[in-house]
Image: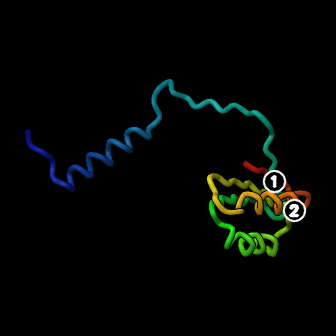
């Protein structure tokens, strides 16, 4: 057999991908509504999540957490998800103490 050149191979691959995107007979999509999703208010900023992943970060954690505290964004619209693992410095204790102190200010706080 003859192998297609790079351009022909690219066209064949593109045709195969496009063909796979075409709806198949009898393969209708079914959407299950679990809860009513309300649009965000035009008057309120959207809710956002900040993920904090810290390992051996005791030297920089105070600066990082201070930046989060000084964000000019409503804290009740911010969720924080934080995790540490295998730290040999004081990162876990520092982060846990900070989260305890600020958790009532934020929309949601989770520690892992």
State left or right for residue 5 relative to residue 59. Answer: left
Q: Secondary structure at mark 2?
A: helix
Residues marked 1 and 2 touching at CB (< 8 Å):
yes
For this orientation, the residue located farthest to the top is 26
Q: Residues within 10 Å of mark 2 (few under 14, many from 20)?
A: few
At horizontal 47% and vertical 26% (from top left) the residue drawn is: 25
Determine which quarter of the picture holds residue 28.
Answer: top right
Question: Disc 2 designates what residue?
Answer: 102
Q: CA distance from mark 1 to mark 2?
A: 9 Å
The image's mark for residue 97 is none
Q: Position of residue 39 (x, y in %)?
A: 79, 52
**Residue matched to label 1:** 109
Quadrant housing the N terminus: top left
Residue closest to the far left: 1
Relative to 27, 68 lies left or right: right
The quarter holding residue 58 reads: bottom right
Place of residue 34 in the rendered image (x, y in percent of width and height, measured from the top left): 76, 33
Q: Which residue occupies the foreground of this view, 73 or 9? A: 73
Is 84 displayed left or right of 5 in the figure?
Answer: right
- Closer to the chain start, of discs 1 and 2, is 2
- Looking at the picture, tell me which residue is in the foreground, 87 or 106: 87
Q: Residue furthest right?
A: 104
Say which residue appears at 71% left-offset and 62% top-offset: 90
Question: Toward which corner of the image does residue 62 lie, by quadrant?
Answer: bottom right
Q: Position of residue 44 (x, y in %)?
A: 86, 63
Q: Against 111, is 22 above or below?
A: above
Pick out the residue farthest to the front.
88
Question: Residue at image x 78%, y 44%?
Answer: 37
User: Which secondary structure, mark 1?
Assistant: strand
Q: Residue at x 81, y 48 (%)?
A: 38
């Amino acid at each position: 057999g003859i192998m297609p050149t790079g351009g022909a191979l690219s066209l064949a691959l593109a045709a195969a991908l496009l063909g796979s995107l075409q709806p198949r007979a009898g393969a209708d999509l079914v959407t299950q509504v679990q809860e009513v999703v309300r649009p965000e208010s035009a008057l309120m900023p959207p809710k956002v999540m900040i993920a904090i992943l810290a390992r051996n970060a005791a030297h920089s954690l105070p600066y990082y957490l201070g930046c989060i505290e000084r964000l000019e964004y409503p804290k009740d619209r911010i969720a924080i998800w934080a995790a540490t693992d295998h730290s040999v410095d004081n990162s876990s204790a520092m982060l846990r103490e900070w989260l305890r102190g600020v958790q009532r200010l934020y929309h949601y706080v989770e520690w892992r």
